[in-house]
């Protein structure tokens, strides 16, 4: 009984169905320590263990389309935090960033998603301590 209650409480801390974030004029720093803004969406797919990203990244050199999926492996969850390793990055044909740009984490590197429940349908989501977004149930 204890483990069933603990599992139930643990599941309430993170989304158990896909949730999405819409980011408008998010200001970030890239792999080369250069500032850029991001407009687009992130979707966390818990059962498929993937994070999809679609949007436009703009910096002083112009804008580029981002369209990729991070497939996660070795996924572990503890108290609202999901620790995983990026098993593969699927880059769509329309993605203009290129393979050398990792965005969150490169293949084989760790990725951490931390969720803080706000309501039954919304969570504050932090990715690798540097991306913060509101994640809502689809």
Image (tube, rainbow, N blue to C red):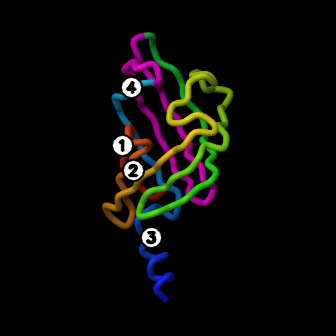
Q: Is residue 6 above or below residue 80?
A: below
Residue on which the image places disc 2: 125
Q: Residue 128 lies in what quarter of the image?
A: top left
Check whether the beta carbons of the residues at disc 2 and disc 3 lie within 8 A of each other.
no
Q: Is residue 71 above or below residue 13?
A: above
Residue on which the image places disc 1: 132
- Where residue 69 appears, as percent x and y from the top left, is 61, 40
Q: CA distance from mark 2 to mark 3?
A: 16 Å
Q: CA distance from mark 1 to mark 2?
A: 6 Å
Q: Residues within 10 Å of mark 3 (few under 14, many from 20)?
A: some
Q: Main secondary structure of the magenta part?
A: strand
Q: Earlier in the sequence, mark 1 or mark 2?
A: 2
Q: Is residue 33 magenta?
A: yes
Residue on which the image places disc 4: 29
Q: Secondary structure at mark 4?
A: strand
Q: Secondary structure at mark 1?
A: strand
Check whether the beta carbons of the residues at disc 1 and disc 2 lie within 8 A of each other.
yes
Q: Secondary structure at mark 2?
A: strand
Q: Is residue 70 magenta?
A: no
Q: Secondary structure at mark 3?
A: helix
Q: CA distance from mark 1 to mark 3?
A: 21 Å
Q: Residue at x 36, y 49 (%)?
A: 134
Q: Which residues are magenta?
A: 31-60
Q: Residue at x 40, y 56 (%)?
A: 115
Q: CA distance from mark 3 to mark 4?
A: 32 Å
Q: Earlier in the sequence, mark 4 or mark 2?
A: 4
Q: Is residue 137 above or below residue 86?
A: below
Residue on which the image places disc 3: 10
């Amino acid at each position: 009984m204890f483990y069933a209650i603990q599992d139930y409480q643990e599941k309430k801390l993170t989304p158990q169905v896909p949730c999405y974030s819409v980011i408008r004029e998010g200001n970030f720093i890239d792999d080369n320590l250069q500032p850029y803004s991001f407009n687009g969406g992130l979707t966390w797919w818990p059962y498929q263990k993937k994070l999809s990203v679609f949007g436009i990244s703009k910096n002083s050199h112009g804008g580029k389309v981002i369209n990729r999926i991070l497939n996660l492996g070795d996924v572990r969850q503890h108290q609202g935090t999901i620790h995983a390793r990026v098993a593969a990055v699927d880059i769509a044909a329309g993605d203009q960033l290129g393979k050398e740009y990792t965005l969150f984490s490169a293949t084989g590197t760790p990725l951490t998603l931390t969720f803080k429940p706000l309501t039954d349908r919304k969570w504050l989501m932090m990715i690798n301590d540097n991306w913060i977004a509101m994640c809502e149930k689809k």
